[in-house]
Structure formats: structure tokens, C-alpha cells
Amino acid sequence: MSFWSRIHCWRRSEMPRPSGIIIRVVLENTWRFSLLEASLTVAELNFLLEKSRVVNQNPMERNFHVFYQLCAGANQEDREALGLTNPDYYYYLNQSGAFTVDGINDADDYQETRKAMDVMGIGLDDQVEVMSIVAGILHLGNISFAESGNYAVPIDDEFLAFPAYLLGVSDQLLKSKLTSRIMETKWGGKSETVNMQLNVEQACYTRDALAKALYARVFDWLVQAVNTAMKIRELVSVGILDIYGFEIFQKNGFEQFCINFVNEKLQQIFIQLTLKAEQEEYVEEGITWKPVEYFNNKIVCDLIECRKPPGIMSILDDVCATLHAQTEGADVKLLEKLGQAALPGNQHYVGFNAGFTVQHYAGKVTYESEGFCERNRDVLFNDIIELMQSSQHKFIRDLFAEDVVSSTRRGKSSTASNKIRTQANQLVDRLMLCTPHYVRCIKPNETKKAHDWEGERVRHQVEYLGLKENIRVRRAGFAYRRPFDKFLRRYAVLTKETFPHWHGSVTDGIQHLMASVNMEADQWQFGRTKLFVKNPESLFLLEEVRERKYDHYARKIQKCWRRFRSDLYFYNLKKQASSIVMNKKERRYATINRNFAGDYIGMDENPALKSLIGRREKIEFAATVTKYDRRFKFANRDFVITGQFVYLVGREKVAKGPQKGQFIEVVKRKLAMEDIGSVSLSPFQDDFVVLHTTEYDTVFETVFKTELLNVLNAKYQHQLGRGLTVKFSQAITFNVKKEGWGGGGKKQLMFQKAGQANFPTLKLSGGKMTISIGAGLPSSTAPGRQAPRRPDAGRGQQKQQRPQQQQPQKQKQPGWGRPPVQSPGSRGSLKRRNTGDKKMSIPRGGQRKVANRKSKEFNPDFLKVAQPGAGAGRKAPPAPMPKRNRAPPPPPPSLPQCRAVYTYDAADTDELSFTVGEMIEIVKEDGSGWWTGRLRGREGLFPNNYVERV
């Protein structure tokens, strides 16, 4: 990389090993040519390190950040050991006058750098060596020279001590190698060595060459250490190339020439991959196209790096090869050779007596030839290498491990321009293997301040970056292109004809797709092998339709999966619930396979009822049941189970106050789980449940008895740590509530199997009620995924379909229905219940009623009719029902009549009240069990199991 990078590391875990670490490399230098390879791990490749920044900076620019970090962040012990003080003390740092940068805390960054080195597995000893070399470079810069007898001598030998100490060499040996050089000359077959004293300029060059070599080799060592720690594997990679751009100063030298050459190479890639390649693709595909003119900077790259005919770099290398020890006049000789070559005929080159001008794509840049040859040689003399190899520190000796003798025999060494040219071409080759994406940055000013906009500077950058030509090509061209087969494969999902397979030619399939989205003909075009889409909006249309299709299919898959999971959940839930009554109670064929909904009242839609329970109480089960009192009179109650309590909610008429005459919901009974002793049921298929408590018992009837037992048992076990006691008996004795002088005592329910009816008939006798019901499914019947088919043989009953009826005119509160009338007609199978609907289907024959109206159709919305003393709907009293005539006589001219065999008190205003023996005219009969009749000049509903036809 071209800078001292701060590597911020975040561990995925607390494990100390460096693998699996995410690395963010903060790019923070003006000359940035670095390629960051990111695959499963991270690799850093070093391209074109700007070594000259170590010894020289432009005005108001800092050196590499690590120097300032070390001065600001080292502790007192390290500062004394390394001889550190303020940055303005060091010549290599005080040339530009810039020591701090807004937004950068050098002390904190130093600690992060040290921490990153720890994470990368760099040991403490190696960290000490690295920081010692960094400090040694600073102290080297403070060695200055003066002329004494045409030779260079240190101005103050005191400045030699600290760099010699940090580098592990003798201060006198360091002085000697900086001010002299051993030259080897050959004459005939003999060789002779000469100790040549250096002048001030040569001594400064040798000092700076040592500083740059130390920095570059430490940097290479760090890159290798990071790559080793990250265990690089060359797989699919993502490269990040961060470049600053051209450097054009008042005085431009060899460094600016190299930087601008690399920028030319990268601009050439940009042109080749955007402007040139795109226009050539249109021509190859036969797309109607008017070429866009642009500047191709290949001619400038050839001017600089070409070998035949020789370019500027080749001529510079030839001049440096003939220099030997003589440097005077080398730059003049370079200009002479440049003038003698064919370069003056190039329109992008202009030479003059002190330098030359190159017409780069970014503009004209004038370079002064002074120092070109000396800097191009980039020679680290063997004396300096031998000096470092004599160091007491093995770390430094390993950095300079080359064989001096062999390198001398090889002859000509590589120059700086040759290295830069080689590395630039390697970088280009690597980039050409990638699919590039560009982010062009514009430098708005030289003040480095926000909201400071130099319009002319910005305009110039937009022009030389080729952005206008790129935009013209993009506007005139096509935003999207794909091979025919890939395009059809990607968007085949848009129509049924193309997905999953299109039977026909690829172009016909594409035309069918475009017609399906009504895309205009001028928005797309066929090439020879690719389809071209002009505007991004057209592509966005295709993508949006494709996204909708996938969303539609994804929802279908989710729906099927959730349905499967729901079926499996309810199946397991039914099995769990059935285990309570397995082999103990007969089952009902119509309800054994129904799904459990939990809330059969609609608590979310009934805030008044929910407020009685408590808004923070989670409702586990809620259903309207038929509750029987001590006289076996029935009333509707809402039976609610929460995590801690059982509630019985009814309705009462307000006697006083502004709500006088209105019915409100009240909690009739609240039971804690510990108050419940046991639950009793019969062994037959009836729906009666007796809840035994410490005070008095509750008798009720519900078709959801199995689900209710399952929920109650689960909450009971959660609260008390033991299962609920469930008893099964044909004779159930229960305690009744004491009310007045005659209250209290015990009552009894007697169950018997009689007939084939699936609905019970009730018979009262003193303190006992006898419930008779036909045989149900065997007690060993288990629920299945499919509801068992009802056997027709032996029942003598036909499958009854629920009649459809218009909605009654009278609006009632939801969730309350008339109790079921136990008619001898059979019930149909339950349909799947949707718990999300406000109006839920209730098992046929369980709890339903008919609205009072003239229509002959049946409407299940009659369940909304309210009744006093119960929930928002009522249930018909399950009283004993006499046998009906199997074949009723043809209707007489007048209305048929029936005689009351039981006394019935109306529970709502649309019902008839009657006593035993009264005659009622039958206006309409309904299969639900509630008939419409006329008594004493008034029409109303009455239960058909309280009467007998005459």
C-alpha cells in the first residue's frame, strides 16, 4: 500500500487467534495506489509506495501518520527510550508546517495501531523493532551536513548518536557511510577500490535514501505479516483501489511525473472499459449508433512508457545507465536525448532548456528536469546495505538480507521508473481481470474546508476525467444489456407461458415478455446476441413485476406451509385433549375433528367484556355456555379461562341510574385455580360438565368441552403443579348455592343411553335431572387429520344441511347466541373454523337460534340476538322433548297447532311465554328447533321441544 495504514479490527468472537477478523483499512494519504483484496480473508498488495513522502512533503501536507502517532501516543518510558518529542523537532516533519489534522486524534490512533498489531499476531519484540525504526528515521532526518574542503561533514555529530543507537550500528560507522562511498573501478583486467568523499548534496541524498529504504522495507514486512496472519486464499475476491488523482504544482519533479503516469494508466482502463468498449459493443451487436468522440490517452501512455520507439522513461533509463559516479550534467544530457528522439514530433510533448511539458488528459504539466536522473537511479549503495547488515538487531539485518557481492556482479540495477512502470502494468493486468465499478471524486478546493467551491477547478476536473463523454455515451446508449437466454431466464417468471419453460425461440419469448408488461418498442432493441434496454425506468418496471411475482409465489408457499403447520399443531392439540377423555367418554362424530379456536366469543371485538376480565389477562379460552342453576333453569354465561382464573360472565338489567333498563355484562363468578377441586362428566356423548369447587358447584353445557378440559388442565397444572382431576360417572352429585332459608343442599344428574338421537332429552324429577341421549362414537375413537365420515346405516337419519337465511333486521351484540334446541334431527360435520373472523361458525345443533321475521330462509346471524341474564346470544333450554310423529299429516286449511307440555318463560322480547296445556298456533317450523308461533294474538319464537303437535 502507499501509506501507513491504520487497521481497525473487530473480533467476531473473543478468541485470540487472528483468523475470522474483519479488517477495515482506512485510506488516508494524498498518493494512494493500493489494492485491497477481500475474500473470506483480506490481502494487501503493495503497489507504488510513495517513499519520497518520508523525506519531503508539499506545503501544508503531513508525512505518514505513524510518525505523528508515535510522537503523540507513546508513553513516557517509550518516549525516553526512543528519543521522542514534539513533531516540530524533526526535519522530516517540520518542512510543510502541518502537524495536526482536524478530526484525527493521533494519540488514540496510536493505541489502535498497537492494538491492531496485537490482533495480527505481531509480537511485542517485533513491535519494539518496528517503532524503533520509525523513530530512527525521524532522527536520521536531523543529521545535516556542511561543506568543508568541498566535502560534506555533519554539522553536529551529536545528532548521529540516537539514530545509530536505534538502528544498532556505530555512530562513527554511520557517519562514514553517509559522507563517503567505496567505488570499484576496472582498468584492463584489474580492479581497484577507491574511497570517495561525498559532497553535501550527495550526503543528503544518501541519508534520504537510507530513510526511504528503512520505511519501505518495514512497510513490506508489515504487509507480509498481515497477509500471513489472515491466511490468504486466492478465491473470488473484491478489490478496492483508492487513487487521489493528478498532482500539478508550481514545481513538478520526478515524483509528480511518476504519479501522473500511473494516473494516465488508470484513466486508460476507464476509457477502455467504459467509452471505448461500450461503443464497440453497440457496433458488434448491430445497434444503430452514432459514435461519441472522446480523448483516448493511449498516445500519452506510449509517450511515457513505450520502448519502441523509446519513450521518456526508456530514454531516462539509458541516460542513468551511463552515469556511473558522475552526476553533474546528467539532467542536461537527458534533455538533449529527449530532443534528439522523435518526441518533439509528438503533439503531447514540448521540451525547453530546463525541462519539458506533457499534455496529460488532465491538462498540461511542466516538469523541471533537475534531479530526474539522480532520483530515477533509486540506488541504495552497497555501503548503506552493508551498514544495515552490521546492525546488532536481527530484525534489521533480515530486512537487508540481499547478497551485496552478487548484486554488484549482476551489473545494472533496476531504476525507479522501471519499477513504477512494471508495477503499474501489473496493477492494470490485475484490474482487467475484474468487473469495475467507479466512484469519481471531485476536489472542490485547495483549502480543505467545507462549503468552499471553486467552480473553475470543478469544471476542469469534470472535463479531464471524461465524465461528460461518459454521460453522453450513457444517455445515447442503453442502460442494460443481457444475452437472450439470460434475459429470458431471469424474467420468465412474469408470465405463465414462459415459466417454468418457454416452448419456442428465445426472441419470441422475449417479445412475449415485453408485450406482457406493455413496454414501448423504442425502449428495447434486439442485438445479434443480446437484448438492450434503454432507460433504467424500463428495467425497474421489469424488476418490479418480477419482484411481485416472486412475492406472490412466496406468499403461496408460506400459506401452504403455515396451513400444514397449523393442521399439524391442531392435530397434536386434539390428540392431547382427547387423551383426557380417551376410553372414558363417548365421542361425537361431528365435533371430534374440529379445530380449536380458543376464543369463540370474539374478546378482541368486545372491549367491555374484556375490561371485566382485565386487559393484562391473557385469554386462553372463551365460549358461551348454558349454565344450570339449583332449579335446573338455564341461562347463558360467558365461560372465560385465563392463566390464573376462571370467569363466568352474565348480563343483568340496570334498575337505577342513567342506564336504567339496559343490560350490562357482570362477572357472576370468579374462581382461582386452587378453588377448583375436580371436574365431572358423563361417559356418554352429551355436553354436560360439572365444575366442583370449594364453595358450590357449577353445572353447564358446552360443545367445546374437550378443548375446555384441555386448557383448564394445562393452566391448573401450571399453577398448582399437578393435573386436574377429571371424573366420569353416570350419576353426578353436585352442591348448589345457598340462597335464603331454603337454599343449599345437593342435586343430582342422571345420564342414560336411550334411542338414537344425538341430542339429549331432559326430564326433571325433584332434585334430579335425567339426561337421555343416543349412543355416540366409541370412547376409544381418536381424532384424525380427516374427519371421520358419518355412518348412514343404523341411524335412520339423513344428513341435515344448515339452511341459509337473510340477516335479521334486529341487531344484537356479537358473541351471544340462543342455546341449542335438542331436536331429534341429525347434525352435519363442522366446517373448519377461521379464528380471525369476527363471525365464527358454531357446531351445528350446538348453540343457535332463528331471528323473528317472515322470511322462509335461514340466516346464522340470528346468533347476535341478546337475552337478559346471559351473554350477547342465547341458547335454547335443553328440556325433555317428546317424540314427534315420523309422518306428519298434511296441513289443514287453518294453521296447525301444538300443546305446551312444559312451562316456558321468555328470555327475550321476541319469544313467547306459555304454561302447560296452552295451545299455540304454528306459523313456521324451522329445522334449528325454534319455531315461530302465535299465542294470545302475539307472534314470537318458542322451542319445539317444549310442545307437542296436536
Image (cartoon, rainbow, N blue to C red):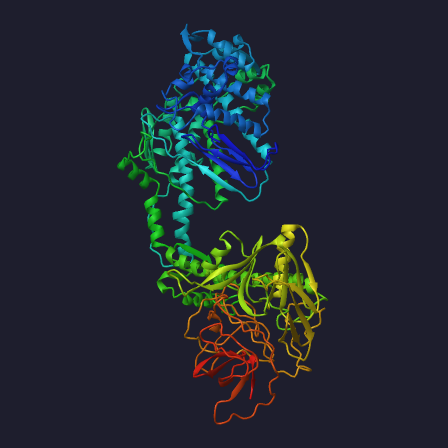
Name the outermost residue toward the bottom: 893
Q: Is residue 511 visible?
A: yes
Q: Is residue 318 left or right of residue 670?
A: left
Q: Quadrant of residue 21?
A: top right
Residue 99 is drawn in which quadrant?
top left
**Residue 738 location (% of width, % of height):** 59, 61
Residue 127 lies left or right of residue 347; in this view the side is right
Residue 529 visible in image: no
**In the image, residue 461 above or below residue 203:** below
Question: Where 416 sits versus 88, above or below?
Answer: below
Q: Nearer the viewer, residue 865 or 135?
A: 865
- Can you give x and y, in whole percent of width and height, for residue 553 in the image? 51, 62
Residue found at the very far front of the displayed protein? 741
List x then y, in percent, for residue 607. 45, 58
Total labels: the figure holds 0
Work out whether 692 lies above or below 396. Answer: below
Quarter of the image for the C terminus: give it.
Answer: bottom right
Q: Quadrant of residue 225?
A: top right
Q: Position of residue 505 (x, y in %)?
A: 49, 68
Is 135 drawn above or below residue 736 in the view shown?
above
Which is more toward the observer, 35 or 934? 934
Outermost residue, top side: 149
